[in-house]
Amino acid sequence: MDVVAYTRVSTGKQEKSGLGLEAQLDYIRKAAAQQGWNIVATYTETVSGSIKPEDRPEMSKALAHRMPIVTAKIDRISRDVEHMASLMKRVQLKIATMPTADNFQLHLFAALAEQERVFIRGRIKDALKALKQRADDGDLVSQGKIARRTAALVKARANTDTSAATDALTAKVEDHRKEIEPHVQACLYRGCTTLQSLADCLNEKRQLTSRGNQWTPTTVRRLMTSLQLSF
C-alpha cells in the first residue's frame, strides 16, 4: 500500500536541532517495513498542534496525494478530537506506534491525547503559580528563573515580529519587481545596452527603486539579476 509520511514539531528551535524528527521518521519507517507500506513522499512542518490539520501547508500537500497518511503518534496530527474526526472523514490515517488501529480506536486515543493536553496545561499553570509564589516570598533561585523566562518570552516575541516584518518586506520587493519589469523591458527595447543607460531610462520614466530612490548602475544590476534579464 502506498502511503504518505507526515512529521511535525511545534517550534523552530526543534526544527533546527532535528529534535524529535528523526525519532518520528524512525517510527514511521519501522512500521512501514513491518506492514508492507511504500512511503511515496514525506512532509515535515513546524506548526502548533492547535492549528487544524487541513490548514497546515505541508499537511495540505500530503492530503493532495489522496493516499493514507502515516504519522509517528496521534499527537503529531493533533491533540484535538474534533480535528482528528474532521481529518479522518477526508483521509485514512495510520499511526506508526499502533499500525493496526481502526478509526474507532483512533477516536479513543485522540480523546486521551486531548485529555493529556489539558493535564499538561494544568501542570504548567500550577508550576508557574508555585514558582511565582516562591519568588514573591524572596527565593532568589525562583526570582532568577522567572527573570530568565520573561527574557525568553520577550526574545521570542521579538523574533516573531522580525519574521513578520521580513515577510512583509519580501512581499513588497516582489510586488515592485512585477511592476517595474515592463518598464525595464521597454528600456531594453529602446536600445539600452549598459547599466548606466538603463538606470537613466528608468529615472527618465520616473520609476523608483523599492526603497523609493533613483536608479544607479548598482541597483540596476541587482534588478537585472533578480529578473534574470541580460542586455
Image (cartoon, helix red, strand yellow):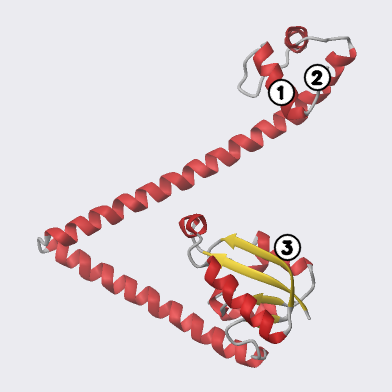
Q: Secondary structure at mark 3?
A: helix
Which numbered circle lies on residue 184? 2
The disc, 2 or 3, on the residue closer to the chain's N-terminal end is: 3
Q: Secondary structure at mark 1?
A: helix
Mark 2 is on which residue type?
Val
Left-right relation of 149 to 113: left
Real-space Cα distance between discs 2 and 3?
Answer: 36 Å
Q: Is residue 180 above or below residue 137?
A: above
Left-right relation of 151 to 185: left
Residue bearing the label numbered 3: 61
Instruction: Answer with the quarter of the image where residue 131 lies.
Output: bottom left
Residue closest to the eye, 154 or 8: 8
At horizontal 52% and vertical 58% (from top left) the residue drawn is: 15
Which numbered circle lies on residue 223? 1
Instruction: Answer with the quarter of the image where residue 88 lies.
Output: bottom right
Real-space Cα distance between discs 1 and 2?
Answer: 9 Å
Mark 3 is on which residue type?
Lys
Residue 178 rendering spot, x and y as whole percentages:
77, 30
